[in-house]
Image (tube, coloured by chain):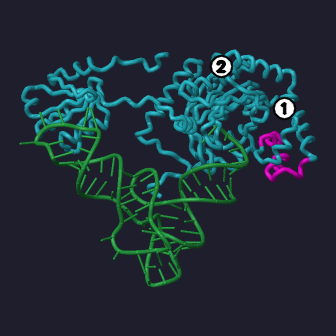
Chain colours: A cyan, B green
Amino acid sequence: MLTTRPRGTLDVTPAEAFKWHYVEEQIRRITRQYGYTELRTPIFEHTELFARGVGETTDVVQKEMYTFTDKGGRSLTLRAEGTAPAVRAYLENGLEAEAQPTKVYYLGPIFRYERPQAGRLRQHTQFGVEAFGSANPALDAEIIHLAWVFLKRLGLSGLTVDVNSLGCPACRPVHRQALLDYFRPHADGLCADCRRRYAQNPLRLLDCKNGACRRVAAGAPVILDHLCDECAGHFARLRQYLAEFGVEFRVNPWIVRGFDYYTRTVFEIIHEGLGAQSTVCGGGRYDGLIAHLGGKPTPGIGFGLGLERLLLALEKQGVRLPPPAAVDLFVATVGEAAAERAPALVAELRREGMAADLDYLGRSLKGQLKYADRLRARFVAVLGEAELAEGRARVKEMATGQETEVKLGELASWLRRQLPPPQGRNADE
RNA sequence: GUGGGUAUAGCUCAGUUGGUUAGAGCGCCAGGUUGUGGCCCUGGAGGCCGUGGGUUCAAGUCCCACUACUCACCCCA
């Protein structure tokens, strides 16, 4: 137990951390371009926030929350989802008083008690985006476009963007009734899950994977045929914008989503290389949620994007992310006097802003070179008795094997001239 | 919560019909080179064979349970 991590969790080892850094950099970059700023919320919230926000009857609330009671007797829950906390923070901090719409993003862990499988964990990391205060379909399109461009930039292909509209409180009940009427005569032929869905959430009848249910569902009334004029118009304009933005999407009337708060636009981005859990990004509009959580009636839209799934998709596809920065200069020594001088030399280089390192295991010179190679050092300064006496080091460029004599006092300035100039991290292509 | 598969070294895996001190490749450390990495050669370290029970003269191997991992269902990122 001491040496195993809790079920459904993941370690990010030093060998992989650079991938996370790279993805996080791309998140900072694209959100800045689209005008979204970061919102950080606690890792746990009052249980009631999720229960009310996501919906009492949803799977997440009924069986997947990490809920505990603290010493003050409060019921708290590890962040089970990103939107409800964002809405809570928006209301609590009076963000509605700032320039509208409020466009925020978040990046952090989400916890759900589920059976782990490919692309599903009990703790995973979501990059999410939320925009509060506008019902303009251009905003729906902006958000879908953001997610799509983000994934494309990282080098993913084999992506499918599915969009649908779930209607609003005016038209959804009409469709719901039509669904119930349609399925009632077929009820006996449905699977057990679907009989439960019939009672609880008829929309879910549409995306059952059971063959018999599927055949019945194929002829079921489609929400898109029941949308009210406003919702139909919203959806039409969304499709128009997406086409103008160059997003390759398809209308999929069977995508539903598991949270109660969705209205109108819902969408998913699927990656073909993932297993059964192929949705890398999912989201939609929630025009009733903010009022439902105690705010003024305010429309909203957002998505969640799973980073572990994203990394998995990149790996399946063989995308190579830029490797981490390596050591600029490694100080290798021969003899005791040099070995004692090395730490201060390295400290000096680090003060000058260089990435410098040295051996701590008393390795032979050969061993040190090997270690430096392993660290992908660009240069190795060899310091022995002769060099120490002369006040200089033999600096070897690892890629070419070429050696140069450099005075110890000039090591930092010499090195600076060799290294490429610092690049702006968010330089555009 | 339900169902299938798997569990041997840090990693990927061998291990005959049960039979003595459990192996390989990669990785790690060292040597070959008295001061020079990558390639090559040699050596070394590293294994309660997932855990517990059972069958047997004898279990890594057969049986049971548990746990973990894994894939799928439900649902979701």
The segment highlighted magenta reads A186-207
For the point 15% across and 27% down, the residue is A393
The chain identifier of the residue carrying mark 1 reads A
Residue type at mark 1?
Ile
Magenta segment includes A126: no
Residue A108 visible? The answer is: no
Is A376 on the left or on the right of A261, as rendered?
left
Q: Nearer the viewer, residue A343 or A385?
A: A385
- The residue indicated by pointer 1 is A223
Instruction: Determine whether A5 is above or below A110 in the image.
Output: below
Would you say residue A35 is visible in this rendering?
yes
Q: Could you confirm whether marks 1 and 2 are on the same chain? A: yes
Residue B29 placement (x, y as % from top left) = 25, 48
Query: Where's residue A290, x and y in %?
Result: 72, 29
Of helix, strand and loop, which mostly describes the magenta segment? helix
What amino acid type should be assigned to the residue bearing mark 2?
A: Ala
- How far from the left and from the top, in percent, is residue A135? 74, 20
Position of residue A34 relative to residue A257, above or below, is above
In the depicted view, which residue is nearer to us: A52 or A258?
A258
Based on the picture, tell me whether residue A199 belongs to the magenta stretch.
Answer: yes
Q: Which element carries disc 1, helix, strand or loop?
A: helix
Q: Secondary structure at mark 2?
A: helix
The dot on residue A388 is: none
Which label sits on residue A97? 2
Task: Please state if A199 lies on the left or on the right of A364 as rendered.
Answer: right
- Left or right of A14: which side holds A92? right
Residue A109 at x, y percent in the picture: 56, 39
